[in-house]
Amino acid sequence: MKHRFLFSLLGCVFFAVSPSFSEVRTLYLSSSGNDLNSGEENAPLASLSEIRERISLICNSAEKPDTLKIHVSGGVYRISHPLILDASLTGGVPLVFEGSASGESVFSGGFELDTFVRISDRLWKTYIPEVAEEGFYFEQLYINGERRFRAQTPNRGEFYTIRRVTQTVLDSTGGDRMPRWSVLQVDPETRFALSNSPSVTPPLATFYHKWDVTRRHLLHQDTSGVLYCAGEGMKSWNPIDTRSRFTIENDKAFLDAPGEWFLSKDGWLYYIPCEGETPENTVCTVPVTERFIIIRGSSDRFVENISFRNLSFETAGYKTPWLGNEPAQAAAPIGAVIEADYARYIRFENCTIAHTGLGGIWFREGCSDCKVEHCHLYDLGAGGVKIGATVVDPEDETYLTHHITLDNNIIQHGGYVFPCAVGVVIFNASDNRITHNDIADFRYTGVSVGWVWGYSPSFSKRNIIEYNHIHHLGWGELSDMGGVYTLGLSEGTSVSHNRVHHIYSLYYGGWGLYTDEGSTGITIENNLVYRCKSGGFHQHYGRDNVVRNNIFGGQIRTQLEATRVEEHLSFTFTNNIVYYDSGVLGGINWEKVGHRSDYNCYFDARQLPVKFGDISFESWQAQGQDKHSVIADPCFADVSRFDFTPKNSRLLRKIGFVPFDLEEAGVYGSSEWEEKAVLSDELLQAFDARIAEYEGAGTSDW
């Protein structure tokens, strides 16, 4: 204390550069604590709700500290509602929530059910009185920390096709493009029967159509098998049609596969166990909350300086509204278990978010200078991280989110409730950095950037998408997707040094790098892209994009595609290596779209002639394109193992290709952390089997 007093006499200038002398107060939280305790180390508190009360008292007192730290001991903390942090609570005092370094500190939004009893070896049940007596219900369930799925037909990975769809308009006041309300009559190709068992909610149909899903409760099934469901009118640009597919869940008649469950209105939960499960070794957890944390500032009072370290947020749910969910690209309206508005300097470090009904994190309106680092997000109902608002006020800059950093995170296994969700999506937001992340096992796009279609003014500028490993997306369930997908005027945006592979769509649009409507001013360089269904690169339409020094290796059907022919320069394509052993080189309108192409290497490993559509390479050069490009083997190290290191140094010099480290993309750090990002052999084999099945069946492309 004496030394601190002497230093203070040296003046405020010295103190300003010596933050180590600031006062830090600590509250302690323990699973064995008591909310009547003082909150000191030897008398910890027990609940997050009591912690919030103490934060308010301390941070709004006359003697508030410079920093308030909340130390969370190892253990599991049950929460039934989200922690709300607002400016009035914190009083401007920085908060640090920090878990135990020696043990896992878990906030769980679920509770454990009583032990199952056997009806038979293939069917168990347990009674939940809250369902029968209080109307409690849930749509997600977790067994031993793994997601299990409601009884569904057909079983997971399979889909019904549609013979006919009819829309009966109930209310036509929705405008010229679509009715406001309607009833869908869906005639499936395959007949199935409903049990009419008393479930808490009706059976739920999920329709997969192009890049969207529509989720609607069934109202009725007539004697001919036609299904009826109500909701908003179908979108004219992407209606449900005979190329759409669907599944039905939540009926006892569909309870026929290991891991499926059904919740009856009378309180009985039925479950078909997986191999190796017994009632004695099974812990069944159901969610009671949708969200974990809400950080809520305002345009005139931001929430600032809150850090979360070494914490796990696990088990949360989602309940489908009565009228279901209308289609929305990237599941844009769907929230996250952690949401922030008008927040600055928020940081998540070494945290886990898992087993959710919603997405992971959303920095929505007016957020800036926030970071998510070394976090593991997995088993997600929707996407991983969202940045920016879907709708902003152009007259109010406080709406805009900017300077958000996602670095060195594992974001995998998502879209289980909303298959159209995205690993990372940037809406109306600028100057964000998405770097060194591993993004995998979603049913749609990996990283989506921009939220303006066409050449209208856009706020999505200078976003950096670099050094990410983006892979195993699509699973042949939706269409029109990309490993990296962009929209609108995006000047200063960089998509570089990424490793993108195994993107597989149902019909069209399984692209590695996809510059969609109006994409402008984007630099795409030093990326490795391989094993994508519809092409390594595709531009729908845009202006002045630069595609250079990339390796496009072994896409399945087409290597390069472009769609809309416009009068301006759409993109330049230079210093790239394009290698293929199946499909064609240039698809759709590649030879027609206005672009400049030169100093590239093209090589068909089958020794077939290189052609752009019906144009031979010689005729292509005669048109002024690829004058200095060559047809040559880049001599990759081992294509069978996806090692695309080019060994033909003479070729590289000739086309001006600058080698880059193919292994630098993805997470970094300890071997344990890097190994955590590796997908299981079982999942990889299942993905390859899906490709083989669809390619063998000749699933058509549009």
Image: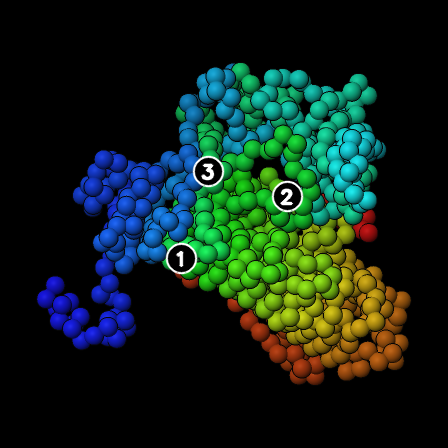
Residue 511 left/right relative to 44: right
Q: State the SS at label 1.
A: strand
The residue indicated by pointer 2 is 419
What residue is shown at x 62% (from left), y 21% (from top)? 252
Q: Please name the residue that numbered disc 1 is placed on.
A: 304
| Residue placed under numbered mark 3 in the picture | 315
| Disc on res. 345 | none
Taking 25 as reference, is 86 left or right? Answer: right
Q: How many marks?
A: 3
Q: Secondary structure at mark 3?
A: loop
- Tag 3 or tag 1, which sits nearer the N-term? 1
**Where does the image place residue 676, in percent across and percent down from the top left?**
47, 52
Q: Is residue 453 visible?
A: yes
Q: Residues within 10 Å of mark 1 (few under 14, many from 20)?
A: many
- CA gap between label 3 and label 2 equals 19 Å
Residue 611 point in image, percent of width and height: 84, 69
- 475 or 556, which lies in front? 475
Tell me the crowding category of disc 3: few under 14, some 14 to 19, or many 20 or more residues within 10 angstroms, Cα based. Answer: many
Q: Could you tell which of marks 1 and 2 lies nearer the N-terminus?
A: 1
Classify 378 as above or below 347: above
The residue depicted at 50 percent of the width and 64 percent of the height is 403
> Comparing marks 1 and 2, which lies closer to the viewer?
1
- Name the quadrant containing residue 617: bottom right
Q: Position of residue 470 (x, y in %)?
A: 59, 58
Mark 1 and mark 3 in contact? Answer it, CB < 8 Å: no
Q: CA distance from mark 1 to mark 3?
A: 27 Å
Front in this rendered view, residue 657 or 92: 92
Residue type at the position of mark 3: Thr
Q: Amino acid at mark 2?
A: Pro
Picture coordinates of residue 701, whole percent (x, y):
80, 51
Element on which disc 2 rests: loop
